[in-house]
Image: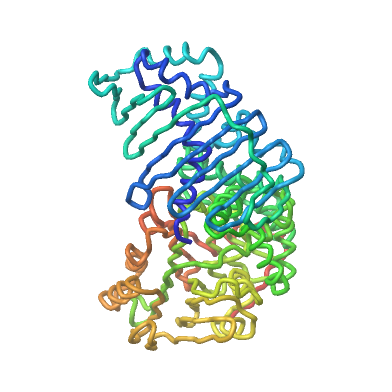
Amino acid sequence: MPDMNKLRLILLLGFTALCTAPLVVAEQPADLASGLKPLATILAGKQARFDLSGKIELPIDGKPQPIEVSLVRYDDQSFDLQLTHADYAVSIRRRSDVTALALPKHGVVFIGTGDAPDDDNLSPNAIAERLISDHSKLTQLRFGLNVLAAGDVEGTLRGLLANMNVKHDDASGAFSTGNAKITFPADNSIDAEIDNVQVSLVTKTEVATAPSATEWPDMKVTELPRHELERTLLRGIRRATEILQPGDSLTKPSMKPRTTEHGELKWVDGQRVAVLWGTPEQIGMAHGELLPEESRRCIESVLYSFGTANVVRTGRWFRHDLEDAYARLSPHIPDRHKRETSALAASLGMEPEIVQVLNVFPELFHCSGFAVFGSATKDGKLYHGRVLDYMTTIGLQDASTTFIVKAQGQIPFANVGYAGFIGSVSGMNAEKISLGEMGGRGEGQWDGAPMATLMRRALEECDTLAEVQELWTNSPRTCEYYYVFADGEINDAVGVAATPESIEFIKAGEGHERLGEGIKDTVVLSAGGRLEELRRRVNEKHGQFNVELGQWLMCRPVAMESNLHNVLFVPADGVLYVANASHTKPGAEMPYVKVDLMKLLSEIPADQPSARTAGK
């Protein structure tokens, strides 16, 4: 989705950018204290009523973009917040008994009534404690606010500023230190420039009468439970503080192994690998027990952080869109998957509906894939590459996990995915079948089996390439998707173009109007310049491909900047090589880690319920 990072920055600014002032102004000499006192008093929570307005200009998408900001606090329960950008506008009115989120550019307003949540509420009283995650570097903002709130504001400022090395320009009145410059153009106003961010704010202690939070002339009203509206906004912004400014707990996670009755979490060269076995209920429970925080982050990234930005972008309540999709997709989801999802939700202490709608989220992937074998490779083996280009900006890398699953009565498989998500977008099974997909058009065509459900079913049920093709041919399908299916047993692969109405299989070496001339013993799948580069590389190294060159095929620019993970499957050997994105680098620029599916399966306790052993 376009502009997600821009939207998240705009929303985050509305609640937290104003809180950066204590840290910025803390780098000033002591004689600045009186000038800074009005803003510091507000930020410390010691001004019950105030009007804070101005403009913040920051670089987004490579160019400076201004955001008009207005924040008015009426009391401990009520405030108004307005954010206005050239492309988006948001207005929030919160009162003791109602909360409204208005989107003027869409002409819609969401009004939440009923009780506010006890924990994740938008009460302005000490909101930074709930809004800024403990796992974000922005916790230093909370510390600065708490220091100011603990004592006399001006005295604290003077103490903080006493030892700062700051220069003062008598002619302009500007104070500067390092890359920051601050001026006071008038009483109760401040201009600050830090790096490429410019802030101009004016504070007032007299405020007008609060306007109604329920009266929005000429706007379409959607009513929501207040707890859902406030929880979505607060958790969305809080998760954004983790994504935009991750702390050490996310960038350097603890790699302590964990075990539970039907699962084990291992770390393989810095990557999470969760081994799960048993019945659907046992697998779902073990999933949640092994990955509780990782699952929470995945769910909050999708439902709350992405969801909030998507509401602002589209004017529709995101949860409603997912619920509508699930209602149409649900009849085509196997009962065993629903049982596993319910058990996962119970293990996480969440409503089943939350985990259900998360698992129908992946509808628009933009990816690449290939399979090379026979004359195209150095040793004749099949190498299947899968590039997942999909929104690194929503933080799914914090939940990245390779799952090794041995389900009762099903073929065991490896699933390169994300905690909290049971479907598959990249996988390989113990019968040497591997699969990868890329999304196309047709969002909203949901009267069929979810793509990720079909992918997992193929891993669980199919032991030949022909069976995979038959599953797709005979199943009701959703939207437009493209796939590479490969079979390491017979050294063969196909490209697939599938819509709800039609399906087309492109054989290895076969030319196609969308993909170009055929290349012997090869399937390539991508689009635009990435397809051209992938084809060029395949032709250049044809006959030489091995693990190293297979990984090279997926390097930038075949992989996009949004590259979430890359996988190189070697089905004949039962191994896969996985590279997951970090917070600063796409997957293609991260190290590949070898995951041995067959070895990990052999380590599952022998007394567990047996999986299907089809044998070719």
Question: As rendered, which of 164 and 357 lies closer to the eye?
Answer: 164
Task: Give how far across and how far down residue 200 sits, in percent.
Answer: 39, 33
Q: Position of residue 565 (x, y in %)?
A: 45, 60
Residue sitting nearer the eye, 407 or 107: 107
Is any atom of residue 56 visible in this view?
yes
Lateral position of residue 469 relative to residue 215, left or right: left
Quarter of image, res 182:
top left
Give the total of numbered labels.
0
Residue in the foreground of this view, choosing between 430 and 328:
328
- Colour style of the rendered protein structure: rainbow
**At which x and y percent is residue 80?**
59, 38
Q: Position of residue 441 (x, y in %)?
A: 50, 74
Give the quarter of the figure containing the C terminus: bottom right
> Does the rendering let one see residue 273?
no
Q: Quadrant of residue 179?
A: top left
Give me the residue at 57% from left, 29% from top. Answer: 207
Residue furthest right as drawn: 114
Q: Is residue 113 above or below residue 187?
A: below
Is the residue 91 above or below the residue 410 in the image? above
Residue 338 drawn above or below residue 419 = below
Task: Using the image, determine if residue 34 lies above or below residue 424.
Answer: above
Identify which residue is drawn at 39% across, 88% down.
510
